[in-house]
Image: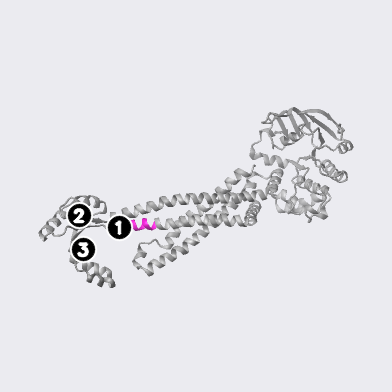
């Protein structure tokens, strides 16, 4: 395409946007709203996924809680049995007293709260380290069959929960977003329809003097794409500042340690930037194509 | 230049608009297309512009059968065969200059070409001094002259005029006819569909009459031949 034609096309598409200011704003807002909600969902899902993968690498241990009232002989026997299971690297015994002390340490300043306990509610436990994370399921299966074992806790519980919740958020989110994107596409196609109607005469003349069909279509196509892209940019800005605020709040007001479990703002933007630009432009282009097919007979 | 060979058009509703038409138009000819309303004049023009597709036969333009053109090629046909209408079809928010320049812009002409060609065309239709005015400041005859300037600015080989004087009073109609005759003398083939008896009678050009889809008369230096 010739450069001067390009100039004309770009000029016409911006004119179209300006001519239907109200509808243009509506189109941009609907794209921005849909993508912001998509972003919100991505913040949740990505962070849960991130947390799950971190949990997998960091918690390669299985916590085995023992039944009450076991004498030390029984506990020793159980320890030996666990040690012999295939895939167990080493185990570590934590008595209920040690568990309480450790907990006090973890709670730090709030540790004194635990002093008021009359009874120590924590059970004795073995902390079983596995040679590799992939053995953990088998190891847990065997331990579960041993007598004296009350309950087994391991990372898989957390991860399974995280994955389940992330999956739920994702499926509900996808439905909501599909509907919102449909609405955005519809609004954009209506905006383009208005521009087409405003330019009916011009289009007729262009056809009469022999302008090519794509020369006639391009400004409308571009107009829709620009509307979509601007919407995407707004959504990205909202997510950038919004996520930064949440990130700062979580890490300063709560625990700095959480920052390790949250995706950094940069990483979040990296994952959303291209996707949003493509989605925004795509919704815009789709909206205009619908209008072009329906209302532009060329 | 233009040749209809056994050309027929049957619309989807079953109307036989043109029946086995054979007609040859030479380069530089000035031809009046006459006949009652609904006789097939409009269909004849639409086939030439490929707004409608012939259902049988050929239409040769410059040796090429335009019934075989693909959709993509049609815009290029319309750069060769230009058209003016009864209702002028000017853009009200553009000046005369811009209206004529627009036809060049949309086919990708260079600014240099546009600057050279547009004043020349406005001069040819006698509106050089009105270039910066808007269509609403013009009379009907002047508007039609602008639309002629726009139609010929891309140098078509044929200019079709579809009742160009239909909305004009006799005096301004003659202004338009003078312009058309001038263009014709410069070598552009002109095909004018009209109901204007006095114009056809005075101009003494070739007259082709269509009735009920058939060519019923084709005479050089003919007359309108119907009651006005």
User: Can residue A35 be seen at all in this image of the molecule?
Assistant: yes
Q: Picture coordinates of residue A179 (x, y %)?
A: 49, 49
* Left or right: A25 in relation to B12: left
Location of mark 3 (residue): A122
**What is the spatial separation of the Cα atoms under label 3 and label 1, in whole angstroms?**
26 Å
Q: Picture coordinates of residue B2 (x, y %)?
A: 75, 34
The reply to whether the magenta stretch includes residue A51 is: yes
First along the sequence among labels 3 and 1: 1
Residue span colored magenta: A46-57
Location of mark 2 (residue): A88
Question: Is residue B221 shown above or below A261?
Answer: above
* Left or right: B179 in relation to A226: right
User: Can residue A282 be seen at all in this image of the molecule?
Assistant: no
**What is the spatial separation of the Cα atoms under label 3 and label 2, in whole angstroms?**
24 Å
Front in this rendered view, residue A257 or B101: A257
**What is the spatial separation of the Cα atoms under label 2 and label 1, in whole angstroms?**
16 Å
Q: Pointer 1 indicates a residue of which chain? A: A
Q: Secondary structure at mark 1?
A: helix
Location of mark 1 (residue): A57
Front in this rendered view, residue A120 or A147: A120
């Amino acid at each position: 395409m010739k450069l001067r034609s390009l100039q004309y096309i770009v000029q016409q598409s911006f004119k179209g946007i300006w001519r239907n200011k109200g509808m243009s704003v509506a189109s941009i807002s609907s794209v921005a709203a849909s993508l912001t909600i998509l972003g919100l969902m991505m913040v949740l899902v990505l962070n849960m996924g991130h947390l799950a993968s971190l949990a997998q690498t960091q918690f390669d241990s299985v916590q085995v809680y023992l039944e009450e009232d076991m004498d030390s002989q029984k506990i020793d026997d159980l320890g030996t049995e666990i040690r012999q299971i295939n895939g167990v690297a080493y185990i570590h015994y934590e008595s209920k007293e040690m568990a309480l002390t450790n907990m006090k340490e973890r709670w730090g300043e709030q540790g004194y709260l635990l002093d008021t306990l009359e009874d120590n509610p924590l059970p004795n436990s073995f902390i079983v380290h596995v040679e590799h994370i992939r053995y953990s399921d088998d190891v847990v299966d065997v331990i579960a069959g041993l007598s004296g074992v009350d309950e087994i806790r391991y990372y898989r519980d957390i991860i399974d929960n995280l994955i389940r919740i992330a999956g739920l958020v994702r499926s509900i989110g996808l439905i909501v977003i599909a509907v919102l994107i449909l609405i955005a596409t519809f609004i954009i196609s209506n905006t383009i329809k208005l521009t087409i109607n405003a330019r009916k005469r011009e289009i007729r003349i262009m056809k009469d003097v022999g302008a090519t069909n794509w020369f006639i279509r391009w400004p409308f196509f571009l107009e829709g794409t620009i509307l979509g892209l601007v919407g995407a940019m707004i959504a990205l800005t909202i997510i950038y500042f919004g996520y930064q605020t949440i990130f700062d709040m979580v890490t300063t007001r709560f625990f700095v340690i959480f920052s390790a479990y949250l995706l950094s703002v940069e990483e979040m933007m990296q994952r959303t930037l291209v996707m949003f630009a493509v989605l925004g432009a795509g919704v815009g282009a789709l909206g205009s194509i619908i209008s072009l097919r329906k209302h532009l007979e060329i | 230049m233009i040749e209809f060979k056994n050309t027929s058009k049957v619309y989807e509703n079953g109307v036989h608009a043109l029946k086995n038409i054979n007609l040859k138009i030479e380069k530089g000819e000035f031809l009046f297309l006459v006949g009652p309303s609904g006789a097939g004049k409009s269909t004849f023009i639409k086939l030439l512009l490929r707004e409608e597709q012939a259902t049988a036969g050929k239409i040769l333009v410059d040796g090429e059968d335009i019934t075989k053109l693909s959709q993509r090629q049609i815009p290029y046909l319309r750069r060769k065969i230009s058209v003016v209408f009864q209702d002028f079809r000017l853009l009200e928010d553009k000046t005369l200059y811009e209206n004529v320049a627009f036809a060049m812009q949309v086919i990708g002409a260079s600014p240099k070409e546009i600057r050279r060609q547009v004043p020349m065309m406005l001069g040819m239709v006698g509106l050089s001094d009105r270039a910066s005015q808007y269509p609403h400041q013009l009379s009907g005859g002047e508007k039609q002259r602008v639309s002629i300037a726009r139609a010929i600015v891309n140098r078509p080989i044929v200019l079709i005029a579809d009742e160009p004087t239909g909305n004009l009073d006799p005096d301004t109609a003659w202004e338009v006819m003078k312009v058309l005759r001038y263009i014709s003398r410069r070598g552009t083939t002109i095909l004018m569909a009209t109901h204007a008896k006095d114009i056809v009678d005075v101009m003494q050009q070739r007259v082709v009459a269509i009735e009920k889809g058939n060519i019923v008369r084709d005479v050089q230096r003919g007359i309108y031949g119907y009651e006005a």
